Image (spheres, rainbow, N blue to C red):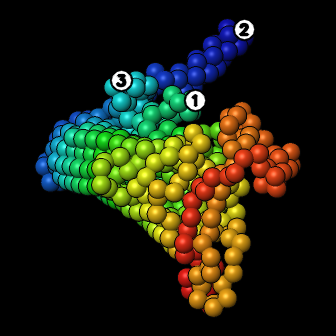
Amino acid sequence: MSMRVSMARISAAVAVGFLAWAGSPAFADELRPLQPLLNDAKPGSTLVLEPGRYRGPVVVDKPITLEGQGKATIDGGGRGTVLLVDTDGATISGLHLVGSGTSHNDLDSGVQVRGKYNVIKDNLIEDALFGIDLQQSNNNIVRRNRISSKDIDLGMRGDAIRLWYSFDNRIIDNVVTNSRDIVIWYSRDNTISRNTASGGRYSMHFMYSQYNLVEDNTFFDNSVGIFVMYSDGVVLRNNHIRNATGTTGVGIGFKETSDLIIENNQVLYCANGLYIDVSPYQPDTVNLFKNNLVAYNGIGISFLSDWHGNEFRDNQFKGNLTQVAVGGGGTATRHIWEGNHWDDYEGFDRDSDGIGDTPHEMHAYADRLWMDVPPAQFFKGSPLLEVLDFLERLAPFSPPKLLLRDAMPLTRLKGES
Protein backbone atom coordinates (compact mmCIF):
# COMPACT_ATOMS: atom_id res chain seq x y z
CA MET A 1 0.00 0.00 0.00
CA SER A 2 2.82 2.37 0.87
CA MET A 3 4.48 1.53 -2.47
CA ARG A 4 1.31 2.61 -4.34
CA VAL A 5 1.12 5.89 -2.40
CA SER A 6 4.77 6.60 -3.14
CA MET A 7 4.30 5.93 -6.85
CA ALA A 8 1.26 8.26 -6.91
CA ARG A 9 3.29 10.99 -5.27
CA ILE A 10 6.11 10.48 -7.78
CA SER A 11 3.64 10.65 -10.69
CA ALA A 12 2.16 13.86 -9.32
CA ALA A 13 5.62 15.34 -8.90
CA VAL A 14 6.52 14.41 -12.47
CA ALA A 15 3.30 16.06 -13.73
CA VAL A 16 4.01 19.25 -11.79
CA GLY A 17 7.58 19.25 -13.09
CA PHE A 18 6.38 18.85 -16.68
CA LEU A 19 3.95 21.77 -16.35
CA ALA A 20 6.71 23.96 -14.91
CA TRP A 21 9.04 22.98 -17.78
CA ALA A 22 6.32 23.62 -20.36
CA GLY A 23 5.88 27.15 -19.06
CA SER A 24 9.59 27.86 -19.04
CA PRO A 25 11.64 29.52 -21.82
CA ALA A 26 13.10 26.14 -22.71
CA PHE A 27 9.67 25.05 -23.88
CA ALA A 28 9.90 27.70 -26.60
CA ASP A 29 11.96 25.13 -28.51
CA GLU A 30 8.73 23.15 -28.82
CA LEU A 31 7.05 25.89 -30.84
CA ARG A 32 6.12 24.94 -34.37
CA PRO A 33 9.04 25.32 -36.80
CA LEU A 34 8.42 28.06 -39.36
CA GLN A 35 11.68 28.47 -41.24
CA PRO A 36 11.31 25.15 -43.15
CA LEU A 37 7.88 26.29 -44.38
CA LEU A 38 9.39 29.57 -45.58
CA ASN A 39 12.25 27.73 -47.26
CA ASP A 40 9.81 25.50 -49.15
CA ALA A 41 7.54 28.34 -50.30
CA LYS A 42 7.79 29.25 -53.97
CA PRO A 43 8.45 32.87 -55.02
CA GLY A 44 5.13 34.64 -55.61
CA SER A 45 3.18 32.16 -53.47
CA THR A 46 1.05 32.80 -50.39
CA LEU A 47 1.80 30.99 -47.14
CA VAL A 48 -1.22 31.08 -44.82
CA LEU A 49 -0.25 29.96 -41.33
CA GLU A 50 -2.54 27.81 -39.24
CA PRO A 51 -3.48 29.34 -35.87
CA GLY A 52 -0.82 28.76 -33.27
CA ARG A 53 2.66 29.70 -32.11
CA TYR A 54 5.75 29.43 -34.29
CA ARG A 55 9.44 29.54 -33.54
CA GLY A 56 11.52 32.55 -34.47
CA PRO A 57 13.74 34.16 -35.49
CA VAL A 58 12.92 33.59 -39.16
CA VAL A 59 14.04 35.05 -42.49
CA VAL A 60 11.89 35.78 -45.53
CA ASP A 61 14.30 35.88 -48.46
CA LYS A 62 11.96 35.59 -51.42
CA PRO A 63 8.90 37.56 -52.66
CA ILE A 64 6.09 35.69 -50.93
CA THR A 65 3.00 36.63 -48.91
CA LEU A 66 3.16 35.46 -45.31
CA GLU A 67 -0.34 35.66 -43.84
CA GLY A 68 -1.19 35.04 -40.18
CA GLN A 69 -4.87 36.10 -40.29
CA GLY A 70 -4.44 37.55 -36.80
CA LYS A 71 -4.17 34.06 -35.30
CA ALA A 72 -0.52 33.14 -35.72
CA THR A 73 2.26 34.18 -33.33
CA ILE A 74 5.97 34.14 -34.10
CA ASP A 75 8.01 34.11 -30.90
CA GLY A 76 11.65 35.13 -31.15
CA GLY A 77 12.43 33.61 -27.78
CA GLY A 78 14.42 36.67 -26.75
CA ARG A 79 17.00 36.19 -29.51
CA GLY A 80 17.75 38.69 -32.28
CA THR A 81 15.10 39.98 -34.69
CA VAL A 82 11.87 38.03 -34.81
CA LEU A 83 11.34 38.35 -38.59
CA LEU A 84 13.85 39.59 -41.17
CA VAL A 85 12.55 40.57 -44.62
CA ASP A 86 15.62 40.30 -46.85
CA THR A 87 14.00 40.48 -50.27
CA ASP A 88 11.92 42.66 -52.58
CA GLY A 89 8.17 42.41 -53.04
CA ALA A 90 7.16 40.43 -49.95
CA THR A 91 4.00 40.97 -47.88
CA ILE A 92 3.94 40.30 -44.14
CA SER A 93 0.41 40.48 -42.77
CA GLY A 94 -1.74 39.55 -39.79
CA LEU A 95 1.04 38.25 -37.53
CA HIS A 96 1.62 38.57 -33.80
CA LEU A 97 5.37 39.12 -33.38
CA VAL A 98 6.87 38.88 -29.89
CA GLY A 99 10.09 38.25 -28.04
CA SER A 100 12.94 40.00 -29.84
CA GLY A 101 16.40 40.19 -28.33
CA THR A 102 17.68 43.14 -26.32
CA SER A 103 20.67 44.32 -28.37
CA HIS A 104 20.64 47.98 -29.42
CA ASN A 105 23.77 47.42 -31.50
CA ASP A 106 22.02 44.74 -33.57
CA LEU A 107 18.71 46.63 -33.66
CA ASP A 108 16.80 43.60 -32.43
CA SER A 109 13.31 44.19 -33.83
CA GLY A 110 9.92 42.74 -34.44
CA VAL A 111 10.51 43.19 -38.17
CA GLN A 112 13.61 44.28 -40.06
CA VAL A 113 13.23 45.24 -43.71
CA ARG A 114 16.19 45.10 -46.10
CA GLY A 115 14.59 45.48 -49.51
CA LYS A 116 12.07 47.39 -51.61
CA TYR A 117 8.41 47.13 -52.57
CA ASN A 118 7.57 45.16 -49.41
CA VAL A 119 4.33 45.54 -47.46
CA ILE A 120 4.27 45.19 -43.67
CA LYS A 121 0.65 45.49 -42.58
CA ASP A 122 -1.89 44.58 -39.90
CA ASN A 123 0.65 43.08 -37.52
CA LEU A 124 0.75 43.23 -33.72
CA ILE A 125 4.31 43.73 -32.47
CA GLU A 126 4.90 43.40 -28.71
CA ASP A 127 7.85 42.80 -26.41
CA ALA A 128 10.19 43.81 -29.23
CA LEU A 129 13.05 46.21 -28.51
CA PHE A 130 12.62 47.96 -31.87
CA GLY A 131 9.35 47.66 -33.76
CA ILE A 132 9.88 47.93 -37.52
CA ASP A 133 13.33 48.85 -38.82
CA LEU A 134 14.01 49.84 -42.43
CA GLN A 135 17.61 50.23 -43.60
CA GLN A 136 18.48 51.27 -47.15
CA SER A 137 15.01 50.12 -48.10
CA ASN A 138 12.87 52.05 -50.56
CA ASN A 139 9.25 52.07 -51.75
CA ASN A 140 7.92 49.99 -48.87
CA ILE A 141 4.54 50.29 -47.15
CA VAL A 142 4.20 50.02 -43.36
CA ARG A 143 0.48 50.13 -42.60
CA ARG A 144 -1.98 49.49 -39.76
CA ASN A 145 0.53 47.88 -37.41
CA ARG A 146 0.24 48.09 -33.61
CA ILE A 147 3.61 48.43 -31.96
CA SER A 148 4.94 48.54 -28.40
CA SER A 149 8.43 48.01 -27.03
CA LYS A 150 9.74 46.06 -24.06
CA ASP A 151 8.64 46.97 -20.54
CA ILE A 152 11.87 48.77 -19.59
CA ASP A 153 12.89 52.36 -18.89
CA LEU A 154 11.90 54.78 -21.64
CA GLY A 155 15.46 55.67 -22.64
CA MET A 156 16.39 52.00 -23.03
CA ARG A 157 13.53 51.09 -25.32
CA GLY A 158 14.05 50.88 -29.04
CA ASP A 159 12.31 52.93 -31.70
CA ALA A 160 8.85 51.90 -32.80
CA ILE A 161 9.54 52.67 -36.47
CA ARG A 162 13.01 53.50 -37.76
CA LEU A 163 14.03 54.62 -41.24
CA TRP A 164 17.74 54.82 -42.08
CA TYR A 165 18.83 55.85 -45.59
CA SER A 166 15.40 54.82 -46.86
CA PHE A 167 13.42 56.69 -49.51
CA ASP A 168 9.87 56.85 -50.90
CA ASN A 169 8.30 54.75 -48.14
CA ARG A 170 4.75 55.14 -46.81
CA ILE A 171 4.23 54.88 -43.05
CA ILE A 172 0.48 55.07 -42.54
CA ASP A 173 -2.25 54.22 -39.99
CA ASN A 174 0.07 52.67 -37.39
CA VAL A 175 -0.59 52.82 -33.63
CA VAL A 176 2.45 53.13 -31.38
CA THR A 177 2.33 52.93 -27.58
CA ASN A 178 5.09 52.88 -24.97
CA SER A 179 8.01 52.79 -27.37
CA ARG A 180 10.82 55.33 -27.60
CA ASP A 181 10.70 57.25 -30.90
CA ILE A 182 9.65 57.16 -34.52
CA VAL A 183 12.89 58.22 -36.21
CA ILE A 184 13.68 59.26 -39.77
CA TRP A 185 17.46 59.35 -40.37
CA TYR A 186 19.15 60.33 -43.65
CA SER A 187 15.91 59.55 -45.48
CA ARG A 188 13.85 61.54 -47.95
CA ASP A 189 10.57 61.62 -49.85
CA ASN A 190 8.71 59.51 -47.29
CA THR A 191 5.06 59.96 -46.31
CA ILE A 192 4.15 59.58 -42.63
CA SER A 193 0.38 59.84 -42.34
CA ARG A 194 -2.52 59.04 -39.98
CA ASN A 195 -0.35 57.45 -37.31
CA THR A 196 -0.99 57.64 -33.56
CA ALA A 197 1.79 57.61 -30.97
CA SER A 198 1.63 57.95 -27.19
CA GLY A 199 3.65 57.16 -24.09
CA GLY A 200 7.03 57.71 -25.77
CA ARG A 201 9.88 60.18 -25.93
CA TYR A 202 9.84 61.73 -29.43
CA SER A 203 6.65 60.88 -31.30
CA MET A 204 8.66 61.67 -34.43
CA HIS A 205 12.28 62.72 -34.82
CA PHE A 206 13.94 63.80 -38.06
CA MET A 207 17.71 63.92 -38.53
CA TYR A 208 19.34 64.94 -41.83
CA SER A 209 16.20 63.98 -43.77
CA GLN A 210 14.76 66.07 -46.61
CA TYR A 211 11.41 66.48 -48.35
CA ASN A 212 9.29 64.28 -46.11
CA LEU A 213 5.53 64.74 -45.66
CA VAL A 214 4.00 64.40 -42.19
CA GLU A 215 0.22 64.80 -42.13
CA ASP A 216 -2.91 63.82 -40.21
CA ASN A 217 -1.04 62.22 -37.31
CA THR A 218 -2.07 62.28 -33.64
CA PHE A 219 0.69 62.44 -31.03
CA PHE A 220 -0.10 62.79 -27.33
CA ASP A 221 1.42 62.16 -23.89
CA ASN A 222 4.95 62.06 -25.25
CA SER A 223 7.92 64.13 -24.09
CA VAL A 224 8.13 65.73 -27.56
CA GLY A 225 5.61 65.71 -30.39
CA ILE A 226 7.74 66.28 -33.50
CA PHE A 227 11.35 67.45 -33.63
CA VAL A 228 12.94 68.37 -36.96
CA MET A 229 16.75 68.63 -36.91
CA TYR A 230 19.00 69.47 -39.87
CA SER A 231 16.19 68.43 -42.22
CA ASP A 232 15.03 70.76 -44.99
CA GLY A 233 11.89 70.79 -47.09
CA VAL A 234 9.70 68.96 -44.57
CA VAL A 235 5.94 69.55 -44.66
CA LEU A 236 3.99 69.22 -41.39
CA ARG A 237 0.25 69.43 -42.08
CA ASN A 238 -2.98 68.68 -40.18
CA ASN A 239 -1.29 67.03 -37.21
CA HIS A 240 -2.78 67.01 -33.70
CA ILE A 241 -0.21 67.23 -30.92
CA ARG A 242 -1.02 67.57 -27.24
CA ASN A 243 0.27 67.07 -23.71
CA ALA A 244 4.02 67.21 -24.33
CA THR A 245 4.70 68.30 -20.80
CA GLY A 246 7.60 68.28 -18.37
CA THR A 247 10.61 70.59 -18.26
CA THR A 248 11.61 69.65 -21.82
CA GLY A 249 8.11 69.27 -23.25
CA VAL A 250 7.83 70.52 -26.85
CA GLY A 251 4.92 70.22 -29.28
CA ILE A 252 6.94 70.82 -32.47
CA GLY A 253 10.64 71.73 -32.37
CA PHE A 254 13.05 72.90 -35.05
CA LYS A 255 16.83 73.05 -35.04
CA GLU A 256 18.88 74.39 -37.97
CA THR A 257 16.30 73.36 -40.51
CA SER A 258 14.95 75.28 -43.50
CA ASP A 259 12.27 75.51 -46.20
CA LEU A 260 9.56 74.11 -43.96
CA ILE A 261 5.80 74.35 -44.35
CA ILE A 262 3.92 74.03 -41.06
CA GLU A 263 0.19 74.42 -41.61
CA ASN A 264 -3.18 73.48 -40.11
CA ASN A 265 -1.65 71.79 -37.07
CA GLN A 266 -3.07 71.81 -33.55
CA VAL A 267 -0.51 72.13 -30.76
CA LEU A 268 -2.19 71.99 -27.35
CA TYR A 269 -1.30 71.72 -23.65
CA CYS A 270 2.47 71.50 -24.10
CA ALA A 271 5.20 73.09 -22.02
CA ASN A 272 6.42 74.76 -25.24
CA GLY A 273 4.07 74.76 -28.20
CA LEU A 274 6.68 75.57 -30.85
CA TYR A 275 10.41 75.61 -30.11
CA ILE A 276 12.66 77.27 -32.71
CA ASP A 277 16.47 77.06 -32.65
CA VAL A 278 18.41 78.80 -35.46
CA SER A 279 15.77 77.97 -38.06
CA PRO A 280 15.65 78.55 -40.96
CA TYR A 281 19.35 77.80 -41.19
CA GLN A 282 20.17 78.00 -44.90
CA PRO A 283 20.63 81.54 -46.32
CA ASP A 284 17.69 83.12 -48.14
CA THR A 285 15.20 80.47 -47.01
CA VAL A 286 11.88 80.80 -45.19
CA ASN A 287 9.89 78.61 -42.82
CA LEU A 288 6.15 79.23 -43.22
CA PHE A 289 3.78 78.77 -40.27
CA LYS A 290 0.19 79.08 -41.48
CA ASN A 291 -3.28 78.35 -40.06
CA ASN A 292 -1.98 76.59 -36.95
CA LEU A 293 -3.75 76.53 -33.59
CA VAL A 294 -1.26 77.02 -30.76
CA ALA A 295 -3.28 76.94 -27.57
CA TYR A 296 -3.13 76.37 -23.81
CA ASN A 297 0.64 75.90 -23.73
CA GLY A 298 3.06 77.21 -21.14
CA ILE A 299 4.82 79.15 -23.90
CA GLY A 300 3.20 79.39 -27.32
CA ILE A 301 6.42 79.94 -29.28
CA SER A 302 9.84 79.75 -27.69
CA PHE A 303 12.78 81.11 -29.71
CA LEU A 304 16.16 80.05 -28.43
CA SER A 305 17.70 83.30 -29.66
CA ASP A 306 17.15 86.45 -31.69
CA TRP A 307 16.87 84.88 -35.16
CA HIS A 308 15.10 85.63 -38.45
CA GLY A 309 13.40 84.11 -41.49
CA ASN A 310 10.15 82.65 -40.19
CA GLU A 311 6.74 83.80 -41.42
CA PHE A 312 3.69 83.49 -39.17
CA ARG A 313 0.43 84.03 -41.06
CA ASP A 314 -3.19 83.30 -40.13
CA ASN A 315 -2.31 81.36 -36.98
CA GLN A 316 -4.39 81.33 -33.81
CA PHE A 317 -2.67 81.90 -30.45
CA LYS A 318 -5.07 81.17 -27.62
CA GLY A 319 -4.81 80.60 -23.88
CA ASN A 320 -1.02 80.33 -23.70
CA LEU A 321 0.47 81.52 -20.42
CA THR A 322 3.11 83.33 -22.47
CA GLN A 323 2.45 83.81 -26.15
CA VAL A 324 6.05 84.30 -27.34
CA ALA A 325 9.38 84.17 -25.52
CA VAL A 326 12.88 84.82 -26.83
CA GLY A 327 15.98 83.62 -25.01
CA GLY A 328 19.08 85.72 -24.46
CA GLY A 329 17.17 88.95 -24.12
CA GLY A 330 16.43 89.07 -27.85
CA THR A 331 13.29 89.92 -29.80
CA ALA A 332 11.21 88.32 -32.54
CA THR A 333 10.92 91.42 -34.73
CA ARG A 334 12.96 89.93 -37.57
CA HIS A 335 10.24 87.42 -38.35
CA ILE A 336 7.08 88.25 -40.31
CA TRP A 337 3.88 88.35 -38.26
CA GLU A 338 0.75 89.02 -40.28
CA GLY A 339 -2.92 88.24 -39.90
CA ASN A 340 -2.68 86.12 -36.77
CA HIS A 341 -5.40 85.89 -34.14
CA TRP A 342 -4.21 86.78 -30.64
CA ASP A 343 -6.60 86.23 -27.77
CA ASP A 344 -4.82 88.94 -25.74
CA TYR A 345 -5.18 91.62 -28.43
CA GLU A 346 -6.32 94.85 -26.75
CA GLY A 347 -7.45 96.84 -29.80
CA PHE A 348 -10.76 97.37 -31.58
CA ASP A 349 -12.30 96.61 -34.95
CA ARG A 350 -14.57 99.58 -35.53
CA ASP A 351 -15.21 98.88 -39.21
CA SER A 352 -15.97 95.17 -38.52
CA ASP A 353 -13.68 93.93 -41.26
CA GLY A 354 -12.18 91.28 -38.98
CA ILE A 355 -8.83 93.06 -38.72
CA GLY A 356 -7.78 95.11 -35.73
CA ASP A 357 -7.62 98.87 -36.17
CA THR A 358 -4.21 99.00 -34.50
CA PRO A 359 -1.30 96.54 -34.62
CA HIS A 360 -0.88 93.89 -31.99
CA GLU A 361 2.35 94.56 -30.14
CA MET A 362 4.09 92.47 -27.51
CA HIS A 363 6.83 93.86 -25.32
CA ALA A 364 9.64 92.20 -23.41
CA TYR A 365 10.51 93.50 -19.97
CA ALA A 366 14.12 93.40 -18.83
CA ASP A 367 13.26 92.15 -15.35
CA ARG A 368 11.18 89.10 -16.27
CA LEU A 369 12.37 86.76 -13.54
CA TRP A 370 11.37 83.40 -15.03
CA MET A 371 13.36 84.06 -18.21
CA ASP A 372 16.49 85.35 -16.46
CA VAL A 373 16.56 82.66 -13.76
CA PRO A 374 15.75 79.25 -15.35
CA PRO A 375 14.87 77.48 -12.05
CA ALA A 376 12.14 80.07 -11.53
CA GLN A 377 10.27 78.60 -14.51
CA PHE A 378 8.97 75.96 -12.09
CA PHE A 379 6.81 78.70 -10.55
CA LYS A 380 5.62 80.14 -13.86
CA GLY A 381 1.90 80.79 -13.70
CA SER A 382 1.86 80.85 -9.92
CA PRO A 383 0.17 83.78 -8.12
CA LEU A 384 3.53 85.13 -6.93
CA LEU A 385 5.05 85.42 -10.41
CA GLU A 386 1.79 86.73 -11.81
CA VAL A 387 1.93 89.57 -9.27
CA LEU A 388 5.56 90.29 -10.20
CA ASP A 389 4.60 90.27 -13.88
CA PHE A 390 1.80 92.75 -13.21
CA LEU A 391 4.11 95.03 -11.23
CA GLU A 392 6.82 95.05 -13.89
CA ARG A 393 4.23 96.10 -16.46
CA LEU A 394 2.78 98.69 -14.15
CA ALA A 395 6.12 100.27 -13.27
CA PRO A 396 8.98 98.74 -15.28
CA PHE A 397 12.52 99.45 -14.16
CA SER A 398 13.52 100.16 -17.77
CA PRO A 399 11.65 100.81 -21.02
CA PRO A 400 10.37 97.54 -22.46
CA LYS A 401 11.61 96.26 -25.80
CA LEU A 402 9.25 95.57 -28.68
CA LEU A 403 9.11 91.79 -28.92
CA LEU A 404 6.95 91.49 -32.04
CA ARG A 405 4.44 93.46 -34.06
CA ASP A 406 1.53 92.04 -36.06
CA ALA A 407 0.23 94.87 -38.24
CA MET A 408 -3.00 93.05 -39.21
CA PRO A 409 -4.21 91.06 -36.20
CA LEU A 410 -7.41 89.16 -36.77
CA THR A 411 -10.23 90.00 -34.39
CA ARG A 412 -12.28 87.01 -35.41
CA LEU A 413 -11.45 83.69 -36.94
CA LYS A 414 -12.01 82.96 -40.61
CA GLY A 415 -15.54 81.77 -41.21
CA GLU A 416 -16.92 83.68 -38.24
CA SER A 417 -19.39 86.46 -38.95
* Residue 27 at least partly seen: yes
Q: Say whether residue 8 is left or right of residue 209.
A: right
Q: Mark 2 points at which residue?
A: 2
Mark 2 and mark 3: Cα distance apart in space: 59 Å
Position of residue 253 measured from the top left corner of the image (x, y, whole percent): 49, 48
At 66% from the left and 84% from the top, the residue drawn is: 349
Q: Position of residue 378 (x, y in %)?
A: 74, 39
Look at label 2 and name its amino acid.
Ser
The answer to whether residue 51 shows anywhere in this view is: no
Residue of label 1? 153
Question: On residue 300, which mark appears?
Answer: none
- CA separation, marks 1 and 3? 17 Å
Q: Which amino acid does label 1 sit on?
A: Asp
Hey, which quadrant is residue 415 in on the image? bottom right
Q: Which of marks 1 and 2 is nearer the N terminus?
A: 2
Q: Name the residue under label 3.
A: 105
- Give the percent coordinates (x, y) of residue 153: 58, 29
Between the C-alphas of marks 1 and 2, the distance is 55 Å
Q: Do the residues under discs 1 and 3 have CB atoms within 8 angstroms?
A: no
Nearer to us in this view, 289 or 86: 289
**Quarter of the view holding residue 190:** bottom left
* Left or right of residue 101, residue 351 in this image: right
Secondary structure beneath dot 2 equals helix
Q: How crowded is mark 2: few (under 14 residues within 10 Å), some or many (20 or more)?
A: few
For the residue labelled by badge 1, is the local secondary structure a helix, a strand or a loop? loop
